[in-house]
Amino acid sequence: MRNRLIAAVVLFGAVLVAAKDGGVSRPLSALSGPRENWKKSFSAPVTGVAVAAVTGEVAANTESAVYFFRGDADPVWTAGGDQDWKHVEGLAVSRDASRVVFQTDIKPRASTEAMNLTIHLLDREGKEVWRKPNPGRYQSLMMSPTGKYLAVGELLHPDTKLLDDNLNVLWEKPVQFWYLRFDPTEKYLLDGEGGKLYTMEGAQVWDFGPWARVLSVSDEAEYVMTQYFRTVKAAQSIFLVGRREMKKVELKGTGGCVSPDGSLAAYVGLSGKLGVFNTADLLAAGEDAKPLMSVTFKKPWMIQIGRDNRTLLALGVESDLRSVLMLLDLVEKRAAWRKEVDPSLRVAVAPEDNREVTVQMDDRTLVNYRSW
């Protein structure tokens, strides 16, 4: 009787969890493909897409409006549209979706010198917390994972400012705003162009090599994967760097990532194989390291290992006529599903658990899928 009662409780709990989650969570072994959650067509081209890393809400913008989605094609709120915004950029959403930031101008971006950008901070319900002039007037904008910090800077000149969430300047450095990246724990800011690592107080604590874009960074910047970007040939070199080990290895490939906890790393080699490795093995043996698993995959646009190390989500080119969106089951070491997509599709965003993925199917259409 007691065993039957326990079984009934377990079964009831499983049903309750499925009901709470809409009944859409599925074992990875049972997946045949992603499940469409919602699809949204816009009246103007979509120029920016962002996702809340933990809670999964999606924000998108056109040149004149911002839209915020929470599990449905009907936006929870829309900003702009009636405010004569002619240029929206720098859209970002904090990890828990409590903060949404972007900047606007009332003129088309014909000349950066002609711009006077305004930064907007909204909460998750679309209420504007504040709007203030960009301290750099026309500089680009970026937000840290929790929204505690903002960075503004110039793409063509070495000048970057780190600000608090009220636009007070914390520090300013001659850093070019090409490839900046906050680590997930928000303790460091990486400068890919200069190859420097800074604390939030502005102290330089590491030099990992210049002229690269940061592909991926683990918690507390323990491991970083970068890629040269200045020429096509140079872009075939990827670098995995271990900060604790003080070691850097070159990998011939076209894209990759490290897991949030730093234990796993993945990259696409020039042979057209996407391999997943123990980071320690890859750092020690380089291209001679033995992968935990590998699949055919050619030119990646997006690769992300889930925070729990169970999945890898990838978008990339499979052939001249076909691109693919793919989910790997890292526990069973197999492809959970592969979905053919338009060859021109290059934009995809996903929360850190890879549970959903939002893809820009064309310049005016977003589709959100449940991936597992």
Image (tube, rainbow, N blue to C red):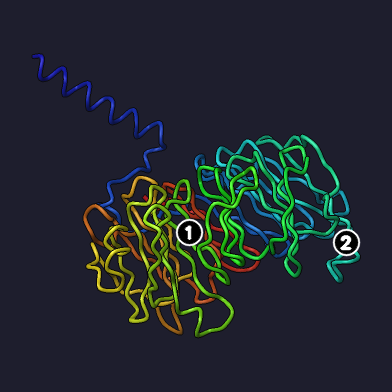
Residue 245 position in % (x across, y down) = 36, 56
Amino acid under label 2? Answer: Met
* Rendered position, 318 above or below 352: below
Compare residues 198 and 181 and report the one nearer the observer: 198
Q: Earlier in the sequence, mark 2 or mark 1?
A: 2
Decide: few, some or many residues near mark 1? Use Cα within 10 Å; few <14, some 14-19, many ≥20: many
Amino acid under label 1? Answer: Ser
Q: Is residue 136 left or right of residue 52?
A: right
* Rendered position, 329 above or below 269: above
Find disc 2 in the rendering and name its residue.
115
Residue 77 position in % (x across, y down) = 70, 41
Quadrant in the rendering for residue 157: bottom right
* Rendered position, 2 above or below 123: above
Find disc 1 in the rendering and name its residue.
216
Q: CA distance from mark 2 to mark 1?
A: 32 Å
Quadrant in the rendering for residue 163: top right
